[in-house]
Amino acid sequence: MHLVNRMSRLGTESAFEVLARARALEKQGRSIIHLEIGEPDFPTPEHIREAAKKALDDGWTKYGPTQGDPALRESIANYISRTRLIRARAENVCVTPGAKPILFFVLTALIEEGDEVIYPDPGFPIYESMIRFQGGVAKPIPLLEKRGFSLDLDQFEALLTPKTKLVVLNSPHNPTGGVIPRADVARLAEMLRDRDVVVLSDEIYSRICFGEEPVSIASFDGMAEKTVIVDGFSKTYSMTGWRLGYGVMPEWLAKAVVMLMVNSNSCTASFVQRAGITALEGPQDCVEAMVKEFRRRRDAITAALNTIPGFRAHAPAGTFYSFPSIADTGMSSKAMADLLLNEAGVACLDGTAFGRYGDGYVRFSCANSLENINEAASRIHKVSERWASAVSSR
């Protein structure tokens, strides 16, 4: 017995692999500061937890509609209409156990062998993994540090061909924290509006921004009917383990996603969806407080990293990540990440875990306390003598 060939095309998320290595070191008695996992360290807000408990007591423990609880889909449609300035209806919404299934289902429904997909690099590794799994041709568009980790529009246009069937955008962006400027999103819309192409706009970090709010490409004329907005509750409401996400898309595509959902998951947990309604319609001060604290941590880690020889960090415009350049240290991204874990006790991610254009960078998550972030910087300083002399001689 053997696995089918396409299984060899699947990639993974190295964050979980690094987490496993870090925990193995902890079992040996080592002190590890975890800056590898993209998971808010805040508890799920109390009013959301209470809504889930009430839903269980009220009997929301049975199968629900495959597309999602109608009340939640209506709430999501209202939220998306208000925040993205489009007219979304409940029929456009598909609720899934986390946001990843939307990526999986949309690529499954739209991509055939040989179809080209443009996606950000560095970027969330599941994009490339799913493109290759479906037999698509992965066309990475580099994100440039000099542009605030946005893309070069001329380079993007050069990648477009008649075989381009899907474009993946992510803003605010994992792993860099970059946000695509409104003017650039407008030009992207102009390039794509009249093409036979769908845009998968990953907006899971839309509420975690520190300046001008990111703009969705769906908000531009003619784009809502060819855009899939991917969002969810994991990051905004610190509900990672609840597994609750959704996609907002044209109705013809939603019908296909529902078919894939019924053939895989049947439905999303009913009581979790009731908690989702409370999350969207209840108090939002919990989100504001979390973002305020992430901003404080962002400022601290940016300042601290810029004191380390060979490190160059820009303050990210969104998310809770820092993606400093370590090119001037003379070390590879993987060697740096391994050194920091094994000798400094700081778990971070090698930039190439997010694609080949991530080489020369590492990713730190700010989903840890300010005290631990400062301690991590101190530990990195202590091992920086490994490369500091090479940096000073340049």
Image: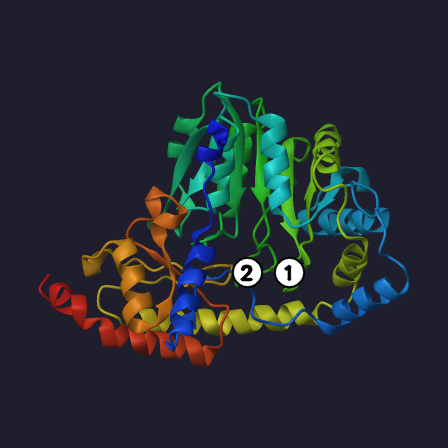
Query: Which residue in the rendered view is the most extreme toward the left?
Result: 393
Q: Which mark is residue 241?
A: 1
Tell whether label 1 touches label 2 (CB within 8 Å): no
The residue at the point 54 percent across, 63 percent down is 39
Residue positioned 40% across, 62% down in the render: 21
Furthest residue toward right? 58
Residue 329: give x, y in percent of width and height: 20, 61
- Give me the residue at 64% from left, 31% from top: 226
* Left or right side of 392 for 291: right
The answer to whether 141 appears left or right of 278 in the picture is left
What is the crowding at mark 2: few (fewer than 14 residues within 10 Å), some, or many (at least 20)?
Answer: many
Foreground disc of the pair 2, 1: 1
Which comes sooner in the sequence, label 2 or label 1? Answer: 2
| Vertical placement of residue 368 versus 264, above or below | below
Above or below, 152 relative to 45: above
As displayed, is residue 17 above or below residue 167?
Answer: below
Q: Which residue is mark 2?
A: 209
Q: Quadrant of residue 315?
A: bottom left
Depth check: 174 or 295 in front?
Answer: 174
Q: Amino acid at mark 2?
A: Cys
Residue type at mark 1: give it. Answer: Gly
**Residue 378 locus on image (x, y percent):** 31, 78
**Does residue 293 appear to the left or right of 286 in the view shown?**
left
Q: Mark 1: which secondary structure?
A: helix
Q: Is residue 152 visible in the rendered structure shown here?
A: no
Q: Image quadrant for the C terminus?
A: bottom left
64 or 210, which is in the foreground? 64
